[in-house]
Amino acid sequence: MKTNKKKTQVGSMIMLVVNAASTECTTLKPDFYSESCPQLETIVRAVVSKAVQTEARMAASLMRLEFHDCFVQGCDGSVLLDNTANFTGEKDAIGNLNSLRGFDVIDEIKEWLERECPQTVSCADILALVARDSVVEVGGPSWTVEYGRRDGVTANITLANEDLPSALNSGPQLQRNFESKGFNLQQMVALSGAHTIGYARCLPIAPSLYGKVTDDNSINRGYLLFLEKTCPNGAAPALVPLDNDTPAKFDKDYYTNLLLGNGALHSDRVMVDSAGGTVKDYVVSYAEDTESFFLDFAQAMVQMGRIQTLTGSQGQIRTNCRFVNPPPCSSSTKSTLKTTSNLGLHKLQHQNP
């Protein structure tokens, strides 16, 4: 079933509004904070814009946070949690360690929101909005963000190691990974277009250059030499642009480069491998049509934001995105505090008749 889509031209940017109605039941709403925190989108837009203008690479980093959050036990903000005595956070997972960044930007947004709308906006909702605004900031599509998620109270490094897509995934592995989160092949290819911005370190690239990796027949010889020079023996700490032409602009060049054999990651190249079939057809389609790519990417991002969300009374609204809220005082503690307070007041009354 197709989701209704509406296309509107706003200046030089294509504004995409994805109809929230779908066959999937969701309690998330675009106007969830219209009364409780009407300044939410203004605040987030200002902080994201400043961060990306300071460092263009930050757009990809911020967008990536929502991917890595929602793919592990749903969109619950768990990727933001620091390690505690009770659990090891997802930041230490194989796909995240020394890779995820932008946490300080989320901290700044959360601190601002806690001043303006205390204990109101969840960290999970912040990630959803930040992903949209970071894409827009570098020329990509916009979409209507739904809100109402609540934050989880634990992280799961085991699931993070199991569920996050790997740069070394084969085509079938990649497909199974996305299908397990409710995405079809077309949506998988559209979401992979997120690699039109940003960079990768040599660590996930090197094994496909110097190790034995299957399904890898599509790399251009000249581009292979470029990767080997940039990541000699995989030891260099260099950053490689995922889109070698326009790494700071959200466009369709990622797909064009894949068809030319210039894909940095093995998991990107397998989509145009000779065994790709239908998947390659989608790559060709997006390489030819920016509007189609933007529409499908926006729709897939809305769907991703609905993965296993906590709503209603589930979870909590974390006041610091890095830590779970401390438990409230017990009734016995409250009673003690009240009694102590009353005794103090009683003494003051007798001392000052």
Image (cartoon, rainbow, N blue to C red):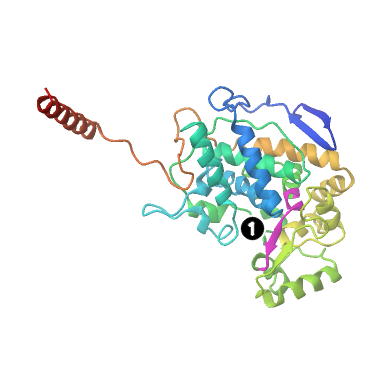
Q: Amino acid at mark 1?
A: Ser
**What residue do we see at 54% from left, 33% from top?**
149
**Residue 200 sits inside the magenta stretch:** yes
Count of picture labels: 1
Does the image show residue 76? no
Say which residue label 1 marks.
166
Q: Residue at point 76% right, 49% down?
A: 193
For this rendering, which residue is in front, 232 or 176?
A: 232
Q: Is residue 74 above or below residue 270?
A: above
The answer to whether residue 108 is left or right of residue 167 is: left
Side (left or right) of 43 relative to 224: left
Residue 46 shows in the view: yes
Which residue is more in the foreground, 255 or 246?
246
Residue at the image position 49 percent from the left and 38 percent from the top: 151
User: Residues in magenta?
Assistant: 193-202
Image quadrant in which you'd find residue 34:
top right
Looking at the rendered structure, the secondary structure element under dot 1 is loop
Rendered location of residue 230, percent (x, y): 74, 72
